[in-house]
Image (cartoon, rainbow, N blue to C red):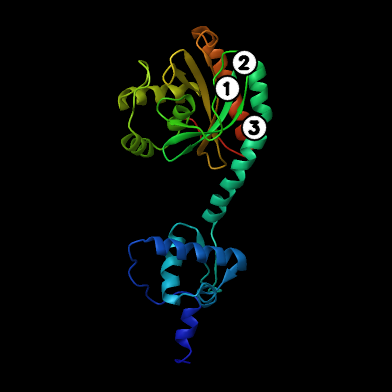
Amino acid sequence: MSAQSPQRRARGRPRSAPEAQAPTVQALDRGIQLLSALARDGRATLTEVSDRVGMPPSSAHRLLATLQAHALVEFSETTQDWTIGVEAFRIGSAFVQRGNLIDLSRDVMRALVNDTGETANIAIPDDGEVVFMSQVDTQNPIRAFFRPGARVPMHSSGIGKALLAWMDPRAVEQILLRRGMAGWTEKTLTTPGALSADLEATRARGYAFDDEERHTGMRCIAAPIFNPFGEVVAGISISGPTARISDAAVERLGARVRAAAEAVTEMTGGLAPASD
């Protein structure tokens, strides 16, 4: 029996795991190989999954333990099997949802253009910037244009501020430290204090307002879109000249944009976080 004991331990996890090494690109590559193998097989013992990717069981276990700490994989003490974890499902679902977001939002965007007379956009956050994904144009001669893939700073755009307002404050701080707060017009918010006050007002009314902060003479109203976990993942907006988006029209248009964002959130299975 004693000769077989090490083999039984190899099927699950070593009795005592070595101290985790500093992460490297090679380690990330091997971790992804393990995830892919488990995704294909459904479940596997340590010996099975390490054999499949061609690495020693001890190395595979260290990587699996790291993935387990982030809920990307799960381990069963009963069966000694490793399986894909709930966090991997959530990440994969986010990719699917992004595709659905663009497709399902088109009718909402068209209705928004018809109701407001302004160009509608959908954009997502990426690496501290806003990336425009889809646009429905107005027929008015003076209009905003953002080609798909266009990137703009978060602090000086309507959708950017709608995203920042519902992000973790620590994440917002890191974005501002890394990206800075460049001034594009006389109205751009260029200090953390000014932006913080604006984000607080954004959360209170449910929509963000870009008052000529990126382009002189142009305004933007945007609202957040949430995923099933109550996390802000995108924003929807209308953009147009100050002559049409007047001070008197902002509240009415803001309510309409907020309703559009709520509709997209619901259609994609999202859930707005509870109000403070």
Q: Residue 98 or 142: which is nearer the viewer?
A: 142
Q: Secondary structure at mark 3?
A: helix
Give me the C-alpha separation between circle 3 and circle 1. Answer: 13 Å
Dot 3 surroundings within 10 Å: few (below 14), some, or many (20 or more)? Answer: many
> For the residue labelled by badge 2, is the local secondary structure a helix, a strand or a loop?
helix
Evaluate whether residue 111 shows in this view. Answer: yes
Residue underneath mark 3: 105
Asked if marks 3 and 2 touch (Cβ < 8 Å), the reply is no
Q: Position of residue 153 (x, y in %)?
A: 42, 30
Q: Nearer the viewer, residue 226 or 31?
A: 31
Q: Mark 3 belongs to which amino acid? A: Ser
Q: Which residue occupies 46% across, 86% down?
A: 5
Secondary structure found at label 1: helix
Residue at mark 2? 116
Q: Give the side of residue 70 with respect to residue 100, left or right.
A: left
Q: Position of residue 17 (x, y in %)?
A: 37, 72
Do the residues bearing badges 3 and 1 touch, measured as CB atoms within 8 Å?
A: no
Determine whether 275 is above or below 184 in the image: below
Name the amino acid, label 2.
Thr
Label whose residue precedes the other's in the sequence (3 or 2):
3
Where residue 161 appears, as percent x and y from the top left, is: 44, 27
- Residue 178 numbered tag: none
Q: Locate residue 176: give its quadrant.
A: top left
Q: Which residue does the numbered mark 1 point to in the structure image? A: 257
Q: How dense is the environment of label 1, judged by Cα within 10 Å: few (below 14), some, or many (20 and up)?
A: many
Q: Badges 1 and 2: C-beta atoms under 8 Å apart? A: yes
Given residues 275 and 268, the one toward you in this image is 268
Question: Which residue: 50% across, 10% down?
Answer: 242
